[in-house]
Image: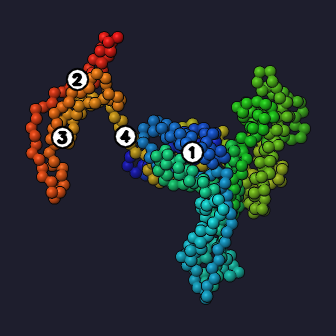
Amino acid sequence: MGAEKNIIAIELGSSSIRAIFGQKRADGTLQVLGYEKESAPNSIRKGVVYNIDKTVQAINAIKSRIEERQKVYVNRVYVGVSGQSLRTVANSVRRQFDIKADITEQMVEDLKEENRAHLYAGAEVLYVIPQEFRLGANLTSEPVGIMSDRIEGYYKNIIARKTLRESLRRCFAGSKLEVADYVIAPVLLSSYLLSDTEKRSGCALVDFGAETTTVVVFEKNILRHLVVLPLGGANITADIANSLHIETEEAENLKKTYGSAYTEEGSLTEPRQIRISNDRVVDEKRLLDIIEARQQEILANVWEQIKDFADRLMAGVVFTGGASNMKNLETAFEKYHHFDRIKTRLLPAATDYTTNLKLETTNNTLATLIAILRRGDQECTSEKPAEPDLFDDPVNQTDTVAGTETAPASNGEGVIMPDNKPEPQPEVAVPSAQTEEGSGEMAQPETQEPPKPKGPSVFKRIGKWFTDLVEEN
């Protein structure tokens, strides 16, 4: 394989598990070679594992398909961490000195570690993002080398339920997979989709998923806010299904075919009937009212998260994710919240990978998986181990210790064959050459015995047993 490395990234989404298989070459280029998806609605909800056993089964199914199609053995993966409980909380740590002194990197690191040790009820700190440092009356993002008798560090801690990472650990341990690294998926996605200029100028990334919507805000190239909202495209589908009393699949098709996040007043000049199934129809305006009501609620929750940053978001808001494909979504946000710096982006303008696969870039986005794949730097596969030949005749196997042939005791499936038990063989004294030196035991002389008669093969014994059975009946 040389300097090439096979990397595997796995993401536990709203209700499914997705994985991508790529190869990093020595020159740094990335080629995507495989993509797998396993639906897991009964084991994962809003990105959180609810049923470990079923999640293990889904991971194993993906692992098996990768091994079969890529002809490799999967032993390591990179895992994206997300989920409803993921969010940022602010914290600060202060130090006072007797005299003015140069602030050192060790002082800054000590502040960060003290901040990380902060306890949250039912949650744990997954990642720490320094914001600014106050030295006297001044704020700076680079305090090292400045003289002061007081320093206060401000941080945004990304926290999640304590059970989130433990559940993931148990799932991958159950699949006998080593986790090369757990990465915060929204942070990695925003770093991949947003340019340095956008993050420096101020920009919000809104990732519309099936059951969750993630909001990440950057300003001055620093992550300022992150939250995962428990609302997504699946809520719109559920509203359609419940209101029209139809199946979820039918509701999803209606949403994708006719859905719109915003409809101008008076644009529906002629009422139109949309056929649902068989002879059933629904008025188009009623369908759009159902969709727009829920979409307006989702956008209102997004605005609530970014409104305090609105006047500082010079680069605006970037929509991404599978549910961002909704028609007139940008128009709806502008009309409802009077903010017009909006664009939709599923992947960076200039992709930095190659692939021969037809990836799902229209209905879903693979940006998160690509971002995790780019992060990986450890080999995740090895050569597939050779499988044993099930038709090997144990009669011909040789005992390498005693140097004698081993008589079979079963039919190869752990079942003793009836009426054909092997004849007792004379005992052979095994030379005690393996006795450790200095053990005080004397080696016994090797007993010479005549060669043991070779018994009938497995297939002959099966044939004899079958013949005897027929004759008895």
* Residue annotated with mark 2: 456
Real-space Cα separation, disc 2 to disc 3, in angstroms: 21 Å
* Residue annotated with mark 1: 52
Q: Secondary structure at mark 3?
A: loop
Real-space Cα separation, disc 4 to disc 2, in angstroms: 32 Å
Seen in the picture, residue 466 relative to 435 is either above or below; the reply is above
Q: Secondary structure at mark 2?
A: loop
Seen in the picture, residue 447 relative to 154 is either above or below; the reply is above
* Residue annotated with mark 3: 402
* Residue annotated with mark 4: 385
Comes first in the chain, label 1 or label 2: 1
Q: Are marks 1 and 2 in contact (CB under 8 Å)?
A: no
Comes first in the chain, label 1 or label 4: 1
List x then y, in percent, for residue 234.
Answer: 71, 41
Real-space Cα separation, disc 1 to disc 2, in angstroms: 49 Å
Disc 4 packing (10 Å; few <14; some 14–19; many ≥20): few
Mark 4 vs mark 2: give the one in front.
2
Residue at the image position 42 percent from the left and 42 percent from the top: 73
Disc 2 packing (10 Å; few <14; some 14–19; many ≥20): some
